[in-house]
Every structure is written in structure tokens, then in C-alpha cells.
Amino acid sequence: MFVPTLLWWLQSSVLPERRIADIFDPHATPGAAEKNIAMLVIAICGGIFLVVGGLIVYTIWRFRRREGDDSQQEPAQVYGSNQIEVAWTVIPILIVFVLIGVSARVIAGVQNASPPKSMLKVKVIGHQWWWSVEYPDYGIVTANEIHVPVAVAGESATYLQLESQDVIHSFWVPQLAGKFDLIPNRTNYMWLDPQQPGVYFGNCAEYCGTQHANMLIRLVAQPKAEFDRWAAAERKPAAVSGSAAHGKAVYESLPCVSCHAVQGTSSAGKFGPDLTHLMSRQTLGAGVVTNTRTNLRAWINDPQKMKPGALMPSMNLTSTQLDEVVAYLETLN
Ligand code: CUA
């Protein structure tokens, strides 16, 4: 697809995480079912376009003004035709009912699919403007990156429990499944079964405030053994490194701890992303920049520069404090 490729190229030079996912290249059961119905709709609408457009072109050509036409003469006047009126009423109604029927069948098929033998439960909570990701069965809390094992259609899948902390968001990983809203005070469920390992990019698909465009999802589908290794690493308490002990003390003395959690320390805030294994994640600010030392330092120094409107304020740290906090956070792998 030319346009997605162009967009990818334009964006990738600045922001490494902005791949445009191709909805016509699904890698999971719900996404494939939805692609098929999209193709059917495109085919039917394309057919209507060709018939209507063809008739217009034919009529314009066939009844064009010719040499010797009387410019005063009106064309033959036709006052109604029951056959034609019945045809253009009944045919569109039939088409609409076919489309409704097929859509309803696919939606019901996806939503009512019985859970497979093996399923991973993941709780995704939408926040302005990032995703909290919890694995209740594993005791893992992370953010913006969702690791799942590669699925076998009909045998294993990942079930997402969708909630919102503030306003309505919408979870959308185009190659895996359709959009699903995260609504305050309500729990929604969706499932996906990525059948090929890889990183699937997604976005928030419901306008939710200033940084709506910057709450990216990286869904990493990996072979079971690799997933298990990732999960085991994420379950461990935060690393305690002697060399960063001073940085840890500085971090714990700052207001950062009232919003962020680092398991096993006094930092237990819930408002911002969990930092226990911060360095295992590829991006900062839900996909605005790659997670490098320089970016991390710049982000903590002033998040508003990288993500204007983000709810994390600048703490006006001194250069020394910044270095120490970054040195500590860098050990959280
Ligand atoms: Cu969250 Cu848009």
C-alpha cells in the first residue's frame, strides 16, 4: 500500500514508533473476519459506483447534443415509471439488509466466540494519555507495551479487560481486531489471537484530549517461551543496584513517588505509569520518543516539551538531581 508506506516513511524519520498498521493485512481471527467484511462492502459499493458512474457516462455520451439538433426542443418527458421506482427502492433495501446481516453475523461471531482452552487475561486501563497494562494472573503491572504469547487459532487467545481511569478511550490495534471503547465505570471485554510473532502497533481511536494522538500501543506477540521469560523478568521486584543507591534516595525524596510506583520501594503512586521495569520498555511518554538515556533525561526535565499537555509536570530538578534520578531509573530493567 503506497499511502501507508509514505506515511510510515514520513513519520519514522522523527518518531520511531509511528508505524501505520495495514488493516488489509490482518494477523488475528477478529481482524481477518473484519477484513473480509470490509472487502465485501468495498466490492458491493465499488459495483454500485461502477453501475451508477457507467450509466451517467453512457447517458452523457449517448444523449449529447448533435449536429442539426433543435436547441429549443425539450427531451421526451417521462412522468414516473412504477417499475423503475420499485427497482430503485427495493434493490437498495436488499443491499442494506445484506450488509446489516453480514455485519451482525461477524460481530456476533467475534463477540460470542467461546473462550479457547488456553487464555491469557490482560487488564488494560486507559489514562490521559497512556495505557496501564496489568496481568492479574502474573502480578505484573506495566504500561503502553502489551506482551502476549503467539496464539493458535481456536486454541489460545488473549482476553483484554478494558477500563478507563478518566474519559472514553478506544483500543485499536488494526491488524488484530476492531476498535473497542474503554469507558469510565464500565468494563468491556475483547479478545485477540495474533498468529505471527511481531510488534503490532495501535492507537487510541477515540478523541480523549490534547494528547489523544500520543497514546500509542505496542503489542508484542512472541513465542510462548519468550513470553514466559519476559513475564518472569517483569515479576521480579525492582532491581536494587548499589551504585544507584544515591539516585534511588533522591528519587524517593521527590514528589515523583506520589504518581509512580516502583515495586518494593516506598514509591507506590498509581496516577502515572509503573516504573518497576521501565527500561524493559521501548518508548517513553506512550510512544513519543524512544527510551534512551538522553530522551529519558529530557523527558524528566520537562515532559511538556515532548508531550505538551501531558499530566506529568516538570519538577524543576537541578542538573545533579536529574543525573541521579536518571542513573537510578536506568537500573530498573
Ligand atoms: Cu485516549 Cu484518545
Image (cartoon, rainbow, N blue to C red):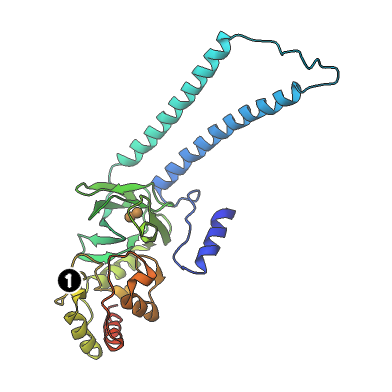
Which residue is farthest front? 72
Q: Nearer the viewer, residue 212 or 241?
A: 212
Residue at the image point whose x is 23% and y is 65% from the top: 141
307 relative position to 188: left or right: right
- SS class of the residue under badge 1? helix
Task: Note whether 277 is above or below 195 in the view shown.
Answer: below
Residue underneath mark 1: 258
List x then y, in percent, for residue 21.
47, 55
List x then y, in percent, for residue 293.
37, 81
151 relative position to 126: left or right: right
Instruction: Determine if residue 300 is in view.
Output: yes
List x then y, in percent, for residue 56.
66, 26
Task: Note whether 259 is above or below 97 in the view shown.
Answer: below
Q: Nearer the viewer, residue 202 or 10?
A: 10
List x then y, in percent, for residue 186.
21, 46
Ligand number 1: quarter of image: bottom left
Instruction: Determine if residue 282 is in view.
Output: no
293 relative position to 123: left or right: right
Residue at the image point whose x is 42% and y is 59% from the top: 201
Q: Quadrant of residue 325?
A: bottom left
259 relative position to 96: left or right: left
Residue at the image point whose x is 50% and y is 18% from the top: 89
Q: Nearer the viewer, residue 97 or 252?
A: 252
